[in-house]
Amino acid sequence: MSNDFSRRQITKSLAAFGAASAFGSFTRPSFAQSAPIRLGLIAPLSGSQEVIGRYQLAGATIAVNQINQAGGVLGRKIELVTRDDKAAPAAGVAAAKDLAGNGVNLMFGVLSSGVALAIAPTLQADKSVLVVSAAAANELTHDQFSPNVFRTADHAYSRQRALAKLVAADYPAVSDWTAINPQTAIGTSNWDSFVDGMLQFYPELNKKPVTITDPIWAKFGATDYKNEIVQLMRSKSEGLYCGVYGGDAVTMFGQAAAYGLTKKFKVLVDPGSEFIIAQAMGKNTPPGLWSGFHWFYGAYKGHKINDDLYETYVKMAGDKHPAGYVGEAHTSVLAYASAIQKAGSTDTDKVIAALEGLEFDSCKGMRKIRKEDHQAICDINFVQFGPDDSEQGWKITGHRVIKDEGLSEEPSPGQPLKFLYNKR
Amino acid sequence: MMSQASNSTWKRDAAIAAIILVVLVSLPFVTSKGIVFIAGTLALHVVFGLSWNLMFGQTGLVSFGHASFFAIGGYAFAWAAKIAPGIHPLLLFAGAGLFGSLVALIVGILALRRSIGVYFAILTLALSQIVYLLLSYIPALGREDGFTGIRRPRLSLGFTTIDLASGNNYYYFMIAMCTLLAVGLWWVMHGRMGRVFKSIQQDAERAAFLGIDVQAYRLRSFAIASGTTAIAGALYAPWLQLLTPEIAHWTFSARPILYTLLGGVQSFWGPVVGAVVFAVLEYGTRTLHGLSEIIIGSILLVVVLAFPGGLLGGLSRLRKRMNRKTIVTARPEIVR
């Protein structure tokens, strides 16, 4: 199963969309009324994170095409302007400044929290808006809150507490948990959020206390996890929270297979590597591994936005497993479309006012953007994987949708996140 | 004769600097915010390149880890501004520079004693990787995720206070500071100390025979270059308002080397030309996602192969060749 989709196919779609816009220009009554609304996508379109950036580009392209085919917004077409942030803060700021300088005041995308945190303080002066489609750092809606930043995706706190709720409900017998985490702020923040959720939900659901054993900290981007794996093999815990994500998780699980680590623990969970681990590990995919998803298409079958997005993506990319980033970039465009429609304008202040408290439908159902801290309240998705005898080597053995009912914290923009139960 | 030559160099360089300054100062009035941001970053990269070339082109010291001082300056400024917000920002910038120089002195005393050439290059590379790893491990500095929430300071000048967070104030402040640093480096290179550095670069043994303390002057060159780079790093912190360990990475250390090789080692303006050409190429190819690096890399390769002395070296050779032709064609007339 190939996970690649042709860049040419996307280029074709963009060209078709561009041609349609150009054709549209001949039939416009006046330029000012029908000039396209330009939305700027900032994503890693080259470098090591390009694999995720192309998902964001695909989701955004599909959303723009769908909106334009339906007549556009306020009678105007939407035009997608893309900029590469290379997942590097300086390149991200340069991209945002470049877009603002070219009159593109409405931006979205951004995978890396570092890039989002770098762009955020520059937006007010440049009179721009950024709708974050993926970066999950809690700081964006807390200590580093900017009135010009919104997040339509779930964030670290809600996602990890949802994961805790899932395992507390599904695995009542597993009461001792430990972790292997990367030494990064997001690694620490994810783990603290998961522990916060476990300390709340496990006793609530199972009427007994949960034991949290000190985690093992690994270097971010490490190539050798043998010491950490040996330490984990000595652990008495039954549940393992594998906080190392993406490529690091692939390296770690690749080395762990030889030690039998995946068989030692009764439950394995991962904060958000989506398909990456299963696609890399194939037949060695850890059985029963739960992975956090931004959006899992299989969970919303029958919901028109979900089905249309999935079908268009598969047709365009030839890939049957779109990552959640496709859905989140698609969602950010839908949020802008709703907000512009509501505001009747693309003016920065009016769009900000319209985004605050906005309720809109998306590939994973209704979302509401909180007025206070600009965080969207939405479903959180998890998928369970296992090895398989098929050519693909892995299969989806289950999925779960957790509603954000009491998962997200109370809004406190400008203040650091306070954990409710995790007082360490 | 000597003073006449340096007088004409001074005038020519001052004229070039004035033209560059006029362009930089007028940019916010005539162009977009994106280009202003790139120009501000470019000014810092120019100082970064010039200070590296003080070591390489002037003193013959090759450093593969110059970015470590950029990072040391940036992080020192950000950390000090956070824990002691009352300190005057100019003192913080100066402090970051002095701290960079101090680290260079300590490293230099140990490293320059015996190792020169490729050994020194590898040692500086190791230093930069140590700094990179330390930055990604220290929680107070934000580890891998970076140092966030760096504010642009208010600049109190006694008679007035300028809010550097407002409008393009910080851009102008950076241009002023980078000009001062570049003038400082020019003065060092063209003064007595610069000539001593040059003599060491040309023949260290002969310089020592003439009574020059080669070790002390190499150390001085290393400390001055590192200090100015640290100030450039400190200026970068409030410019981006975020620092990540990547600015200590060896790939960032390659930047000043690239600027110098591209522009020319022998001229003061070499790293300036290199940095400008690099920035123009990066900006021009920014929408060619994925192809940008290939195009920039290919152009750099062609330039370096076609002009071994850099763009300015190539221009100078071209001018000499044309002059020679003029003399050759002029001679028969003289004979007649």
Image (cartoon, helix red, strand yellow):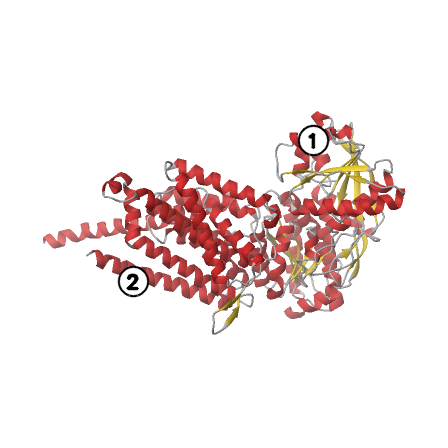
- In this rendered view, identify the residue nearer to me: A94 or B187: B187
**10 Å crowding of disc 2: few (<14), some (14-19), many (20+):** few
Residue at the far bottom: name it: B159
B210 left or right, relative to A239? left
- Residue at image location 83% in from the left, 46% down from the top: A401
Read off the chain for label 1: A
Question: Dot 1 corresponds to which residue?
Answer: A231
From the image, tell me which residue sits under label 2.
Answer: B11
Q: Amino acid at mark 1?
A: Gln
Q: Is residue B89 above or below residue A195?
A: below
Asked whether the residues under marks 2 and 1 belong to the same chain, the reply is: no
Chain letter of the residue carrying label 2? B
Asked which secondary structure carries label 2, the reply is helix
Hey, what amino acid is under mark 2?
A: Lys
The answer to whether residue A299 is seen in the rendering is no
Q: Is residue A23 visible?
A: yes
Residue at 38% over, 36% down: B115
Judge by depth and name the residue closer to the eye, A225 or A123: A225
Q: In this rendering, would B38 be left or right of A397? A: left
Quick check: B146 left or right of B321?
A: right
Task: Where is residue B330? Give x, y as percent.
Answer: 17, 53
